[in-house]
Amino acid sequence: MSGAGRSLKDALKVRAFDEGFSAAGICRPDAIPEAGINLARFLRLGYHGQMEWMARRANWRGNPAALWPEARSVVMLAEAYTPEHDPLAVLEKRGRAAISVYAQGRDYHDLVKKRLKRLGRWLIAQVPGMEIKVFVDTAPVMEKPLAAAAGLGWQGKHTNLLSRELGNWFFLGSIFTTLELEPDEPSADHCGSCRACLDICPTGAFPEPYRLDARRCISYLTIEHRGPVDETLRPKLGNRVFGCDDCLAVCPWNKFAVQAGEIGYRSREELGAARLAELAELDDAGFRRLFRKSAVKRIGRDRLVRNVVYAIGNSGMTELVPVAAARLEDGDATVRDAARWALERLRNGARGAGPGDG
């Protein structure tokens, strides 16, 4: 690579840090040939559950070079959202809702995409005539394998990306460009013999290390899954109403996690440990007001209240019986089913699984 090209790459990374990103790396669009094979296996085993969109664009998802054939380089960016509190502490507060850390502040899609666009405009200004496309979790792009190929970290046994410099609390974004940039060296795996993320999973969603069965993953069940959740899995949800941070929170590499630079990612007080009783009473308008700038808004009121009522059923708090009973007349059939289930559990004195319970 020419000295000028190398200088541009170095300047690009400096600019990325100036924009607020925590790490930057570069790879080729064809740097992850194994991704398509792994995706095909995932789909063949049915691990994607109701996420039909994964299969519909599997050819692009498994081969980034096919997504935009003109692209010559992929710039992968990481942005830290490290929590300031222990994300597992709320699991012991049975009357409160556990919302995944990433959704307690501003929606990362909006914040990361704005930074990507600013960085992309800067890059275009350096090399007039080149083209870019930016992606943040909304296109058929396998960001984690690409980020590993770009040297940002490695996919751990929980399938999330890990970094020796960042831990695993960070978002990913990508800039595809027609510009030729020197790729970085891919990262090596540093999980060793550790099983912390596998052993803590309440639902046993990892059939083996580095393999996730989304159909058993609490993040999938509370966010992606439509309709009633399997009754054998409902007790294991505990009070998690949107996502799950267990496998992320126990990773030893988080001792190196960097502080989140974006104030928008800080937990909003009303979302950090919201009362189940209050969330269960939300109507559509109230839901939209409360979650207007949060990633939670994507699942809609009915799915959130379904999850909240499951959490009420797992709480063991008989004082919440009237709250659950009120949802027997809910306009959504799945919420009504959840209410019947929750009332039966509360009246029988049952409680959901706690952290690490199988």
Image: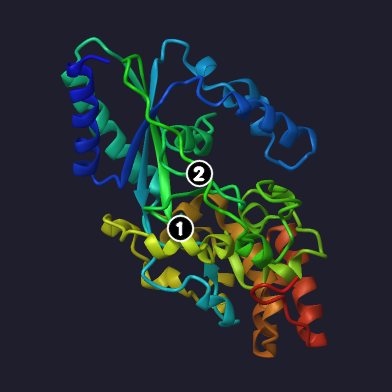
Q: Closer to the N terminus: mark 1 or mark 2? A: 1
Quadrant containing the C terminus is bottom right
Tag shown at residue 154: 2
**Residue pointed to by mark 1:** 103
Q: Nearer the viewer, residue 11 or 277?
A: 11
Which residue is painted at 53% across and 45% down in the image? 189
* Pair 1/2: label in front: 2
Which residue is painted at 27% across and 55% down in the image? 262
Q: How far across and down, in percent of the image, does residue 155 sit?
A: 55, 45
Type of the residue with mark 1: Ala
Q: Nearer the viewer, residue 309 or 159?
A: 159
Element assignment for label 1: helix
Left or right: where does residue 231 sit relative to residue 246?
right
Question: For residue 312, which quarter of the picture?
Answer: bottom right
**In the rendered view, would you say 356 is above or below 157?**
below
Left or right: where does residue 271 sit relative to residue 222?
left
Q: Nearer the viewer, residue 29 or 274?
A: 29
Query: Is any atom of residue 92 visible in this view?
Result: yes
